[in-house]
Image: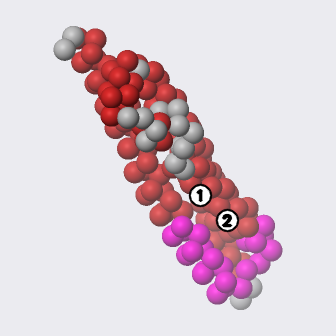
Amino acid sequence: MSATDRNLLAAHAEVKAEITRTDSKTALLLAFVGAVLAGSWTVARDLPLNWPAIVAGVPGMLLLVVAAGLLLRSVRPNLSGRHGFPLWATLTAEEISEAVSVDLAADIAGLSRLAVTKFTCLRRAVDLIRAGGALLIVAALLTTGGAAWGR
């Protein structure tokens, strides 16, 4: 095996590992966002909210819902058949061997584009989670402060 082949195999493995790592982070963030949404809804339903808290809390909840949508988009299966399983499912064993040996660089490029798309969705979702969380914290402070002011 030549040095170029080893480098291509290493790059291919690295890109696949980054995709796996991104998907793992996405799964954790989805669980976190789901827990925050459920907890916030439960707390908001049981507390008497004032208008400033509602004005801050509703956009915060909406930002978290949008973040969850972005996270789901980043882990949505790619069934277009350009590379990976969908393409391989249409090929014979010989065609797979030929495609992998000839098109490893193309597969690395395709997987790298997929990884960048996943990273971008993940980064945007994290930004939305931060903004939504900040608004929910403001809403919580306004609610507790409003309850203290109303006494």
Residue in the foreground of this view, choosing between 22 and 40: 22
> For residue 40: magenta?
yes
Which quadrant of the structure image shows residue 68? bottom right
> For residue 4: magenta?
no
The mark closer to the camera, 1 or 2, is 1
Q: Please name the amino acid that badge 1 sits on.
A: Ala
Instruction: Give the magenta part as a residue range.
Output: 34-55
On the image, numbered disc 2 is attached to which residue? 61
**Secondary structure beneath disc 1?**
helix
Which colour scheme appears in the figure? Answer: secondary structure
Give the total of numbered labels. Answer: 2
Whether residue 20 can be seen here:
yes
Q: Please name the amino acid that badge 2 sits on.
A: Met
Q: Main secondary structure of the magenta part?
A: helix
**Secondary structure beneath disc 2?**
helix
Image quarter (top left, top right, bottom left or bottom right) of the N terminus: top left
Residue in the foreground of this view, choosing between 102 and 5: 102
The answer to whether 47 is drawn above or below residue 72 in the figure is below
On the image, numbered disc 1 is attached to which residue? 68
The answer to whether 143 is drawn above or below residue 76 in the figure is below
**Left or right, 46 with reference to 77:** right
Which quadrant of the structure image shows residue 14? top left
Residue in the foreground of this view, choosing between 108 and 56: 108
Residue 50 locus on image (x, y percent): 77, 78
